[in-house]
Structure formats: C-alpha cells, structure tokens
Image (cartoon, helix red, strand yellow):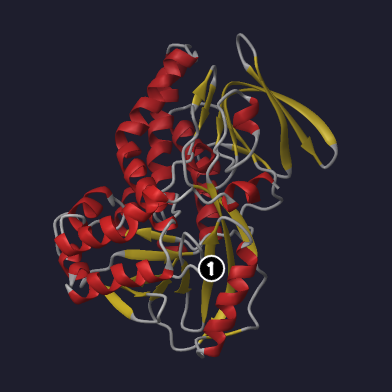
C-alpha cells in the first residue's frame, strides 16, 4: 500500500504529527523500532500549562502539578522560585506517547512496531522506505516522509546535515523522602556545563537526572550518592536510562519529499533540553506545510522549505538566545556560578523576573533580556565570565566524547 506520509518515530511528536495529518484525511503510517508504544523513556516529563492547554494531552497522563522549584548553588545555598498558580505539570512521558498514539490510531493511522528503518530513498514520484521487522525485510512507499526519530544518522544520509552539538542525559527512578517540589542543581561537579535535577512524581517516588557532554552515568551516580547522604532518596530505585539531547538545530530540516521535526530537527530548548512543547508546535507547522504540499502534489524541496521558514520564525530566536546562554554557562566555574547566584538571590532578581511580564515557563528570550538589564548581574557576567571566556581556549572534551 502506498501512503501519503510515513512518519518515522512513534514518540509524542511523531504520533501527534501523524494524528494531525490523518485528521486532514491523509493515509498515514508510523514506523517505530521499539516493541511497545508505552515503553519506558528517558524523559523527565515536565510541561507548562501553556503546552498542556494547547494540545490534546489527557489529564490521565498527569502525575502531579508544580507551582514552585528550588534551585541550588554549588555551595548548597538555595533559592525558591514560586508562583501562586500552577506553572507546570509533571507527566508520565510513556503514557503521553501511548495516549497520542491512541489518538492517531483512532484517526486511522497505521502503526508498525519493531520496525527499524534501514533506508529512505527519495524517487521522482514517491519515497521508498525500507524496514527490518524481526529480520524480515519490507519495502513501503509514500508521497512524503517525516523524520521524528530523535537523534539518528537518517537526516545526514538524506543530505540534511547533522546535529553536531548535543548533550547526554542520564536519569533514574528513585524512592524519595520528604521532597514535594522540583529541585535543580547548578553544579559543575554533578552536571558540568548543564544542570541536574530531582523531580517528585508521587509522594514516594521521583526522578533524578543529570545532563553533561560526557560520562553522564558517572555524574548521575555521584549525584545519587550525595542525595542519599542528605536523606532525600533511597538507592534502591529503577534502572538508569540514558538519552542524547540536541543542543543545536539540524542545518536543514527539509529536502525533496522529506521533513524533520522534534528532536530529529533539534527543535529543543537549549537552556533546559526540553523538547515536548517546541516539538509539538513544530509538528503543527509541519502538518500544515505537508497538507498544503500534498494538496497540490508538490513535495519539492523548494515547496517544503516554507516549513523551515515558519518554524524558525516561531522558535528560532528562542533557540538562538538559549544556545548563547548555554555556551556562556558551560564556561563558568563553580566560583562564577556561586557569584552570579548570590547576586540574583541578594538582589531578589529572581522575584523581579518571576513577577515581570517577560516571565514564561517556555519562552526564555525576553526573560534573559530582562535579567541582563540588572546592572550588578550584568557586571558580574561581563567581568567574571565574558572577559575570561574571550581569553580562554574552547574546551574540547565534549567534541572528543562525541567522536568516540
């Protein structure tokens, strides 16, 4: 059977895109290399109320609400970020994937599980997709293919380039003791260049994770040991899981009869590594772009380039500003982090930002701009971070680790 669109990847973004395309009346298939749609994932699953209210996300996937978070400096000093209203939902990411897949299947989308895509071959009038299912080879055809497969080599093989800056996340489910709000740790010894977290998912369980450019499991083990010593967690939790998270975008997200969306395109917040909301926003844009192209039977690269222009107009500035901040933070020492943290806390800059019109859980560009208008914070960043940053050579351990 020839499909209108084949979606590679049955995560939240792929299934939502398939659901949207099917709602337009197109024949859609989803290929997923995993055996189950509700299998465990390495995702903390924090989404904003804006995201929750904008997309078909069931209340049944929500584990708990969040209106506050506690941020810790390297010294252990902390500050609390709190709003009166609920700011985010902690969700069961596996359940979200299954829910959106159910919605897509209810709209007529066909799912092929344990289906590993081995090759994608654009032809003049269609795209050929070769898959391997338990050792058996199959060939499918579609008018277009959407890559929603996370970080993989498929985009590069199709001439879209590759994402050359990505982090590695490690996370474990643990038993928690007396933790009722999200905790974030800014500590180069626990998550060099990034951050670590403890997120309660119920009264007795939570997720502990760490991001870094290399050896995430070793940093996570160090964090788990420290949290155990502090009496916050027990060390008899579930299996440790790891995942690669893009920090930059794909050089191109379209080609002849091909588009990339979500993590596969690098449509992720560089500040937090969160990709659900941005990915869903871009899936909407991708669905509309494909609808227009399919309607006139023009799936050329030139036609599909409109997709990239539209998603960059939507989130491109946010990604650029977030990436600048991520690179700046990557170069900061423990002392510099502590210095900036102390300025923010002593001047109540965090309270000013929380109460400003620029505050948003998802859109950080205006918030970062507002923060940089604080004279003492800006001075600390310029003379404590930016000047040393401009004089020091770029650390290369991240590149080396990715090459291995």
Residue that sits furthest to the front in the current view: 391
Q: How many marks?
A: 1
Q: Residue at x 30, y 39 (%)?
A: 317
To which quarter of the image does residue 146 belong? top right
Q: Quadrant of the N terminus?
A: top right
To which quarter of the image does residue 141 belong? top right
Where residue 355 appears, as percent x and y from the top left, is: 15, 65
Q: Give the answer, above or below, for where 208 lies relative to 385.
A: below
Is any atom of residue 117 visible in this view?
yes
Where residue 221 appears, as percent x and y from the top left, is: 62, 74
Q: Residue at x 72, y 40 (%)?
A: 115
Q: Nearer the viewer, residue 185 or 397?
A: 397
Where residue 110 appears, as percent x and y from the top left, is: 61, 37
Report the side of 229 relative to 129 (left or right).
left
Q: Nearer the viewer, residue 64 or 396?
A: 396
Q: Which residue is mark 1?
A: 209
Q: Give the answer, above or below, for where 228 lies relative to 305.
A: below
Where residue 42 appears, as percent x and y from the top left, is: 58, 60
Q: Residue at x 23, y 71 (%)?
A: 343
């Amino acid at each position: 059977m020839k499909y209108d669109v084949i979606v590679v990847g049955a995560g939240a973004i792929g299934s939502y895109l398939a659901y949207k395309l099917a709602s337009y009346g197109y024949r859609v298939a989803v290929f997923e290399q995993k055996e189950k749609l509700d299998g465990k994932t390495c995702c903390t699953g924090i989404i904003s109320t804006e995201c929750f209210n904008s997309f078909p996300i069931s209340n049944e996937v929500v584990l708990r609400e969040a209106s506050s978070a506690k941020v810790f400096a390297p010294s252990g000093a902390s500050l609390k970020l709190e709003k009166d209203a609920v700011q985010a939902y902690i969700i069961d990411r596996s359940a979200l994937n299954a829910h959106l897949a159910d919605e897509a299947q209810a709209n007529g989308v066909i799912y092929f599980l344990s289906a590993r895509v081995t090759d994608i071959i654009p032809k003049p009038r269609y795209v050929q997709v070769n898959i391997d299912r338990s050792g058996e080879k199959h060939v499918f055809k579609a008018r277009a293919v959407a890559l929603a497969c996370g970080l993989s080599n498929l985009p590069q093989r199709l001439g879209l380039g590759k994402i050359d800056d990505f982090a590695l996340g490690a996370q474990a489910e643990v038993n928690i003791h007396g933790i009722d709000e999200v905790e974030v740790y800014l500590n180069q010894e626990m998550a060099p260049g990034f951050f670590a977290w403890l997120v309660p998912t119920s009264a007795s369980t939570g997720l502990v994770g760490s991001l870094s450019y290399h050896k995430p499991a070793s940093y996570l083990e160090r964090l788990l040991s420290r949290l155990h010593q502090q009496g916050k967690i027990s060390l008899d939790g579930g299996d440790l899981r790891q995942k690669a998270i893009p920090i930059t975008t794909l050089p191109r997200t379209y080609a002849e009869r091909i588009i990339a969306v979500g993590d596969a395109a690098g449509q992720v917040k560089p500040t937090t590594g969160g990709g659900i909301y941005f990915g869903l926003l871009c899936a909407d844009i991708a669905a509309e772009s494909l609808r227009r192209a399919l309607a006139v039977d023009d799936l050329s690269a030139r036609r599909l380039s409109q997709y990239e222009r539209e998603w960059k107009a939507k989130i491109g500035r946010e990604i650029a500003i977030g990436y600048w901040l991520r690179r700046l933070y990557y170069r900061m020492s423990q002392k510099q982090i502590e210095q900036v943290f102390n300025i923010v806390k002593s001047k109540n800059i965090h309270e000013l930002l929380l109460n400003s019109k620029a505050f948003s859980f998802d859109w950080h560009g205006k918030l970062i701009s507002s923060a940089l208008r604080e004279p003492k914070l800006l001075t600390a960043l310029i003379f404590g971070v930016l000047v040393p940053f401009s004089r020091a050579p770029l650390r290369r351990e991240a590149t080396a680790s990715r090459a291995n």
